Structure formats: C-alpha cells, structure tokens
Amino acid sequence: MVWDLLIVSAMKYLKLVLLFFLPYTALPVAGQEAIPLVNPQGVVESIEISGVPEDEISQAVRGMMQKLVGQKLDQQGANDLLDRIEIELPGFIATTRLAVGTEPDRVKLVFVVEKSNEEPGRRTNVNSRYTVEDVQVDGIDEARLSKGIREDIHKLIGQMLNQSLAERIHHRMIRELRPRYSVVKRVVKGTRPQYVVVVYEVKKASWIPFLDLSPYIVYHSKQNFSAAADVPIKVGSNRFNFGIVDDADQLLERFAGFRIGYENVNVGTERLGIGLHYGSYHERWQPVTTSGIYRERRTFDPSLTFAFDPRLKLTAGVSLSDLEIQYPASHSENSNAAIASLTFRQVWDSSETDKHEIDAGYDLRAGAHNLDSDFIFTRHLGHALYAFQHEKNKLTISVLAGEISGRAPLFERFSLGNTTTLRGWNKFDIAPLGGDRVIHATLQYGFGDVRIGTWSNDVDQKRPLETGFYLFYDTGAVGDRGGAIKARHSVGLGFGQESFFVALGFPIRSERVQPTFMLGARF
Amino acid sequence: MLVSIATHVLILAGQSLSARVDRDQLRVLAPRLHFLVGEPLMRLRNGATVNYEFQLVLRTDRNSRPVARIQHRFAVSYDLWEEKFAVTRLDPAPRSVSHLSTAAAEAWCVDNVSVSITAVAPDQPFWLRLDFRTEDPNDSINQSENMGMTLSGLIDIFSRRSRGEQLRGYDEVGPLRLADLRRKSTETK
C-alpha cells in the first residue's frame, strides 16, 4: 500500500517537475537575428508598384496608394488596396513588400504584382513563381518508381513550381516505397536564377522500431485506473528509458513500480537489434485471486531481434523473473523462460480511399530447469488483426488463441475481460486465477466524424460537436484444461479514435446485465 | 514523448507583450515571441509552406473566461532566391506580404492579429494573451474542409503522437486599461 502511494505520488510529482522544467529547455537562442531590417510600424516615405506598368492600375487606386505616404503604415489600408489590384488584374497576385526607409522609423511600401500558377485561395508558397529546372530522386534508381510517378515528375520540369503536384508525387512515392524507405521532399535553388530544383530524398526506413513505450492511462469501471509513463532518451540508434507504471488492466495482478531499458536497433546492421529491459514491481491482488500470489516481481528481459524485412521480425531471448511468494510461507521463486516471437505488420493503400492493415504474431515462452526456473511450462500465444478502412468507415477483425502446458506463474496465465478483450466483462468474474487456454475474437465497426449536436464555447460561439463512433462485438473463452470453459459474449459502443476512447460494454448473459464503462488515452 | 515535447515547446518566461489601440481594434507587439525557428524554419528553408495558427484572447482577469477571442491562420514560405519570407493570412480575409526578414515576418503576423475593443469598458482592467502553434501539414488540408473546432479534432489534438515539427508558445500582458492605452497612443502621436 505504502509503495503504491509512493509510486502514484512520484508519478504526479514527476509530471509536475517535467511540466515546469521542460519548456525552459527549449527557449530560443537569443539574438538569432540581431536587428529587424524593416520597421512594420514605420511611417511610409514612398510608394512603388512593381511587376506591372503603373498605368495598368487605375488612377483611383494609385491615388489611394499615394494617400498612404507620410502616414504611419496602415496595414489594413494596404490590404484593401491589394484587394482592389487583384480585382482589376485577374490572374495576378498582389502582395506588399516593405523596404528600409531613409530613417529608422520610415519604410518604403512596394506593391508587388505577379502572375501566379496557383489557384486563388491556395497562393501560399512564394516559390510557386519559379520554374522547375530539374527533379532529382536521391537514394534509389528512378527506374524503380512506377510509370505514373515518373510521368508526373516530368510534368513538373520546365513549368512554374506546382506545389500540389509536387506534394502528390511525394505522397505517391511514400506509398510505393514503404515500408523499406522513407521519402523527404525539398526544394532548392537551381543553377540558373529564378529556377528551382525539386529533390525527393529516399532513405532506408528503420527495420526494427523501438519498443512502443507510449504513455497511457485507461480506466475500467470495475478495475479502476491503469497508467504508465516513460522518459525515453534517444541517441542515434540507441534508446534509454526510465518509466513508472501502475497497471491493473493487462494482468491478473495490479503491478506498480519502475522499469528501465536500453535498446539498440542497429547492431552493426539494420537487421539486428538488442533490448535489455528491467522492471521491479509491487503486486496487489483481488480477494478472489487466492493462490499462487506473490508480493514482489523483478524481471529482466534481454533479447535479440532480427528483421527479415521491415514487416517481418523474429525476437529471441530470455525472461528472468524473481518472485517473492507470500503463501504458505514467504519465500522466493524464479520463473525463467526462453522467449521467442515472430511478428508481421503491414499497412497499405489499395486506392485513394481504401487502407488495409495486417498485424499478426506468435509468441513462445518456455520455463525450463536448465534456466534454473521453479516454474516449468510452455506458453503459446498467437494473434492476428485485419483492419479495412474506407474513407471514414473502419472494420476491424481480430483473433487470439493461446495455450499453456505445465505450471506457469500468474503473470503468464491468460485472462479476458479488460479494456481490450471481452469488453463489458470483468476478468475476475470470468477466471480470477486466469486460465491455461484462451481464445478470443473481436468484430468492430467504426464510423467517423458524425455530427451529434452543437456546443457553445466560452465566448458563446456555436460549434459542431462531432466524433468517431464504433460498435463492437467480443467473444471469447478462458479456463483450465480439463475444466469447464464457457464461451462469453459482449457488445458495446464507444467513441473516440485510435489513441483515445470512451466506451460502454454490455456482457451478454441471462442474469442482470450491468454495463462496464471504459475510457483511456494512449499518447 | 516528453523529451520530444520539451525540445519543441516554447514558452516565454516573462511579459514582453505590449498592446496598442488601433481604431476599434487592440493590436499587440511581441518582440520576444520568435516562431520562425527550429524545425519549422528548416522546413521553410527547404521550400515548404508552414502554417501557423494565432489566437489572441482578452480576459478581464488573468484566469477568467475570455470576453473576446480571435483566431487567425497564416501560411509562411521562404523565397529561395531572395532569401526573404512571404506570409499569407489565410483567414478571415486572405492577405499577403512578401520580401520580409525573419523579424519583420514575425512582426507582420502578430500585427495582423487584432481583437475588438468593444468587449471592455475604458476603465475595465483586462489581460491579453497571444498563443501560436504550427499546424501539421495534414491539418491544413483537413481544416480547409472543416473550419469548425470539432470534438474529434480536439480528441485528435490531445491524443495524437507527438510530431517533431510541432512548435507552440504564448505571451501575455496585463492588467491594462483602454483609457491608458489611448492616452499613450495620443502622447506618441
């Protein structure tokens, strides 16, 4: 209890300390530009028109321009004149240019009128007036790109810079070359004045990502809050992290403590990575979980990861855990297991509006005598997810199945009934000691940005109230070999997006149906 | 993520904002508020457009509800040949200026954000706060389709993974009184 309080307090204070100090680490370097060249508040000493002969602008507008001379720069007045120039000269873009005056408090006001190839309302990049001298694709042979992209690239050359086409090419290259490559677009000066070169830099993507340690906070109305936060420090392909966690969602136990880790995702080659993770946790249990419980758990997980390609990875290592068992007498036991996992993940677009995602994996954990383990077991777990997104509609189907043979510690045993499985059920009502067999499936349909009403903000402006909704159906069973394993079902609805959700789950049963409320955010 | 935020969030330590009355509008000067820096500046020098959102809020007390608020969006680009900035105010009324130095471009954006003075009485003390943030390139596409602030938009803002290019900051000043600002304005003239 004391330890939990300390952890929770430490999390609060760490957050406060970080919030207080972190902004100051990013204060701008003083004196990045010592003296402003132009005083935007200065008095206008002269007016000029650039880009078109003066007589192409009406006498009336030119007269109004002259009235600005001798006055403090009236930006609104200048803006009104720009509107009038653009009305008189369709197809041209008019801007004001300020130049240094003869005195520090004086400015010269230049009305610059230029032809633009950008559509009205999208004239947002000044380089659109330059001609594209060349388009370079660095990092790969251009012949590897599809014919469509190569044709679009050639359309850019010799024309005024078409920002939207250049951006479309960028996105198409990203789609074609991922996951092996990333693409960065740059525009640089050409070899001739008024010419630019568009450069697409293609770089090999990281084959092995760092472990996802995103902070999260979730709430389950029958299991209370769970949260974790890490501070990662990345140095090249290395990452160190220190984090704190207090979680009752993932396992049968509430574990609270700290974790530290080191990862290198490029050990001589981008295909090989190593990870060293250590966690020390204090455990709390529900009264219904009566046997096999332990008070403390310390775990060290060294592992090696090999990437066949950025989508398919194999991880192997060991997981060494020291448990302080409470009953029948206080003593220590080891749960040391060899671990291996094979994961596959791919996201791709089949059209402008359709997106697919596959995420699948198989995990093996085996506690063995030769690892000095007191728990001898073999644990298999397979999972697969397929998601199809069409515009704002998303259909997700996922399944998982697992089996344990032998005697495994409680943190290895399977459970269902949290914020991600059998939503609506409480895992302690299903199997308070977990199970050595599990199967689970989810069908979820989401639809986005539905207008559900309006709200008034603090200055009484009416705003639309919109959000993405989803409906889900979960089914699964968990229990021990030889015992009765009952399939359970739940349905529910929620709103939010991938990283934030509020949901209500209803267990389907003949007894009293009590919904479960869940919410959470993964940052 | 926290480290990422730390390197890209800008908050000024003290008051450097000053206000002036311009007809029926309150305008501000923020000489210490630099937003053409860091990752956004690098993108600008690579020929990209970077969109900024500014918000000016007027309160009668530092922590009270706003009595007036205005939001403006600006698209900034960097002229690769002339090595000067161009700025377009995207809304409420599109307006452009070019050939600006870094400081002048920053000043032009700030000068083009104003809030109406009709919300406060001449002797009513008030506070002004100016916030800015860079927009994600995808935000600008989405916002052109949906200009209103939506719940899903808010959820996305608060739940998305941090992006390296995000830069935000603010400055504030107060308590001020319109009568004092008008007097100062008259003395300057």
Image (cartoon, helix red, strand yellow):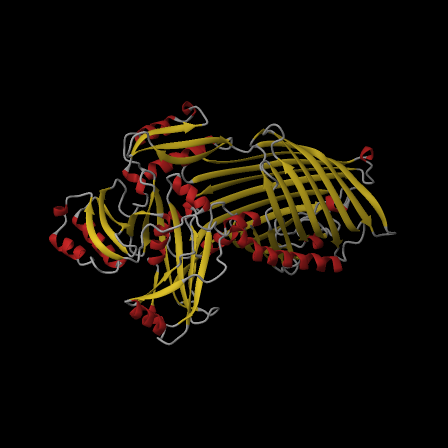
Left or right of B156, for residue A89: left
Horizontal and vertical percent for residue B166?
47, 48
Residue at the outermost right position: A329
Q: Residue at x 37, y 44 (%)?
A: B49
Horizontal and vertical percent for residue A102?
25, 52
Horizontal and vertical percent for residue A151?
34, 27
Give the tally of numbered discs.
0
Relative depth, front residue between B183 and A184: B183
| Residue A406 seen | no
Residue at the outermost front position: A103
- A384 up-or-down from B179: above or below: above
Horizontal and vertical percent for residue A119?
27, 43
Q: Residue at x 30, y 36 (%)?
A: A161
Quadrant position of residue A383: top right
| Residue A186 seen | yes
Relative depth, front residue between A284 and B168: B168
Residue at the outermost bottom position: B123
Quadrant position of residue B43: top left
Relative depth, front residue between A431 and B142: B142
Left or right of A108, for residue A62: left
Looking at the figure, which quarter contains the N terminus of chain A?
Answer: bottom right
Relative depth, front residue between A207 and A314: A207
- B173 up-or-down from A164: above or below: below
Left or right of A74, for residue A144: right
